[in-house]
Amino acid sequence: MEATRYEVQGITCEKCVAMVTDLLQGTKYSLHQRNDAMPVEPEQARLAEDDIPQASWLLTYKPLLILVGFILLGSVLVQVPAGHIYGVETMRYFMAGFFLSFAFFKLLDIPAFADAYAGYDLLAAKWRGWGYAYPFIELGLGMAYLANWQPVLVSWITLMVMGFSSIGVMQAVFNKRKIQCACLGAVFKLPMSTVTIVEDVGMVLMAGWTLSL
């Protein structure tokens, strides 16, 4: 029997291999590993939003969606003992939880985050130190929001930091660059997409709303 070889790109994990293997079951085709396959560069292995099948979108962003859901729920529940729930307070607690949680994942591997962040952030691409400092800036913002310390100053810092960060994110997404989003550090391999834009711009809008009150 004559064998025809096909090269399938974008398979970067065992889960992807298992998915393809399941699809081939019951057919005349089989899957074999090539020993002469060229290594895939990290930039090539990353997925863009357009490469993600609609059915797996929720699976791809599951860690991020669960985390944001927990933060939002906690932002509401923490006000229950006081007997009232205010929208402004919910937003403040949410921003505190957002920055603290996202800083945590970045701090797990700061060099890896700095490498990924330099792939799309305008300042981090030119100055590596910004990628190392960014997780600590998020940590400081999270603690400041939690303590309700200097809310006007903290909101201005948030507005500038997240606003500037969103510029690089939007450029990467609009140019359809296939790179990894560094929002959760190097722990979860999330593709850069409009979801990242929503994160950054959402924080900018909340900080702007706080300043308008």
Image: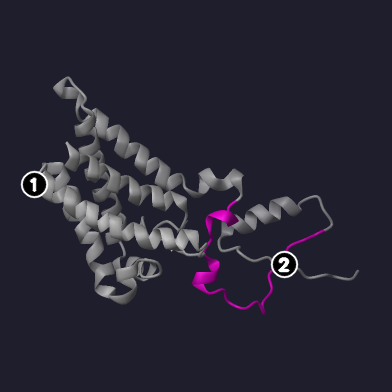
- Dot 2 or dot 1: first in sequence order is 2
Residue at (36%, 60%) from the top-left corner? 167
Q: Nearer the viewer, mark 2 or mark 1?
A: 1
The answer to whether residue 111 is seen in the rendering is: no
Q: Residue at x 49, y 59 (%)?
A: 174
- Is residue 39 covered in magenta? yes
Q: Nearer the viewer, residue 89 or 122?
A: 122
Mark 2 → mark 1, Cα distance in angstroms? 60 Å
* Residue annotated with mark 1: 150
- Dominant secondary-structure state across the stretch colored magenta: loop
User: For residue 39, which numbered disc appears in the image?
Assistant: none
Q: How many marks?
A: 2
Of residues 163 and 85, the one drawn nearer to the viewer in this rendering: 163
- Secondary element type, mark 1: loop
Mark 1 Cα shell of 10 Å, populated few (<14), some (14-19), many (≥20): few
Judge whether 11 appears above or below 102 on screen: below
CB under 8 Å between callouts 2 and 1? Answer: no
**In the displayed structure image, the side of residue 17 where residue 173 appears, left or right:** left
Residue 124 spot, x, y in % from top left: 31, 70
Label 2 sits on a secondary structure element that is loop
Provide the residue span drawn in magenta.
29-52
Is 156 covered by the magenta stretch? Answer: no
Residue 196 coordinates in the image, percent (x, y): 41, 52
Residue 202 image offset from top left, x and y in percent: 33, 45
> In the image, is 66 to the left or to the right of 35?
left
Q: Residue at x 67, y 77 (%)?
A: 35
Residue lying at the far front in this picture: please name it. Answer: 212
Observer-nearest residue: 64 or 173? 173
Name the residue: 61% across, 49% down: 53
- Mark 2: amino acid: His
Question: Which residue position is annotated with label 2?
Answer: 32
Tell me which corner region of the image, top left, top right, bottom left or bottom right, holds residue 50. bottom right
